[in-house]
Image (cartoon, rainbow, N blue to C red):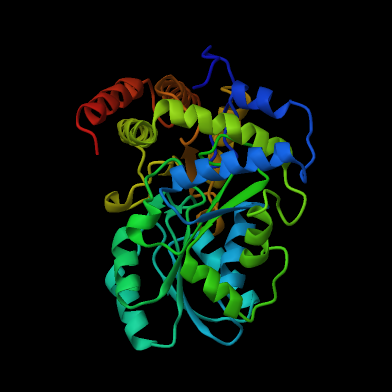
Amino acid sequence: MTETLTDDYYQLRVPGPTPVPRRVVEAMATAMINHRGPAFAELIAECKAGLQWAFQTKNDALVFPASGTGGLEAAVQNLASPGEPAVFVTVGSFGDRFATIGEAYGARVIKLAYEWGQGAVAADVAKALDANPDVRAVFVTHNETSTGVTNPIAEIAREVKQRGRLIAVDGVSSVGSISLPTDELELDVVVSASQKGWMLPPGLAFITVSEAALERSKESRSPKFYFDFVREKNYEDKGQTLTTPAVSILQGMRESLKMMREEGLENVFQRHVDIARGVRAAVQALELQLLADPRYYSNTVTAVRAPHDDPDLNKRFTSTLRDKYKLEVAGGQGQLQGRIFRIGHLGDITREDARQIVARIEKCLVEVGYIDAPVGAVEALDAAMAESAAAPA
């Protein structure tokens, strides 16, 4: 989708924020409208219908002025109560954040934590629920950007729903890029955010909410106002939002949803699969190691073990990549700080963008002395993307 494909264009390839296409930028530059008027009612209805399409759900799709973390906090506030047990499944930094939010609201957190780079095991979730029959909700990350891992959410959801519990999913970096069929999996709450696969600036959280989750929200004893599902739904049913929304981002969203519909949702998912497979193949051709267990590779972010044991050299690599080669990737978080770098490949990204990403990484690795000469990383990427496109996931 990117329109400028010269060798020197700046590429922002962190896991978020992601690039915003020109069409979306122009849509956001239109005149401001009254967020309590008929034009806004039409706008938000169109955006909510698009959200239901992308989330693959008939559940209510609520819009909050917030980051993805705000959406996670909303999930906790509405599904958990102080003193009550709740299961939090974590495979990295954002799963840990979900659990920390649970603690902040007084939930009795039962934390299932896994080694970073691994995915969660559905059988462990089942055991935790069987051992704690008073747990009413499970909170889990679908796609963990800190480690490049996608959890086996279908398997986890099956165990949760078989036991009659609610499930809240952090889909911030997956929905709209990786298929997450909300209704098919019976997911009660799914959270996403504008700055990821939606090709928008930061500023909005999107949350789908089942009828069971709305009923639970009415019972929850956690303090809530701004993120109250029921209160927000009552306003959105009237074509408004509880508080002043990010109107310009919604105007851009109307356009980004048009772009996604033009491509087709399955084609969006397949593009992310193809590019992710290509990037992983290129990384391996460069003799770099991937962090994630191959069973759980993410199609929106690839976590790569840093090329040097020396943190100073690693810092020089990423800074040279940014300053000289105009490619910005993300570093590691928490226990992985200085040990990995992360390539975001979600939202507004084409196969040509992927070629540029790989070519610049290869040039930079030669410059910092990790490899002596180019090794054909772009060719490895092209071959893997072609193979993936010929045999869809």
Depicted 357 relative to depicted 116: above or below: above
Left/right placement of residue 311 relative to residue 308 reads right
Q: Which residue is rendered at x = 34% and y = 71% of the image?
A: 161
Q: Which residue is rendered at x = 22% and y = 27% of the image?
A: 387
Q: Foreground residue, 109 or 234?
A: 234
Tell me where residue 54 sits by quadrant: top left
Q: Is residue 290 visible?
A: yes
**Which residue appears farthest toward the top when viewing the image?**
6
Left/right placement of residue 389 relative to residue 292 reads left
Classify the position of the C terminus by image quarter: top left
Total numbered labels: 0
Q: Foreground residue, 334 or 300?
A: 300
The x and y percentages for residue 168 are: 47, 65
The x and y percentages for residue 46 are: 57, 39
Q: Which residue is rendered at x = 46% and y = 42% of the image?
A: 176
Q: Foreground residue, 231 or 314?
A: 231
Q: Is residue 12 visible?
A: no
The x and y percentages for residue 261 are: 45, 30
Q: Which residue is rendered at x = 48% and y = 42% of the image?
A: 342
The x and y percentages for residue 157 are: 34, 65
Depicted 376 relative to depicted 167: above or below: above
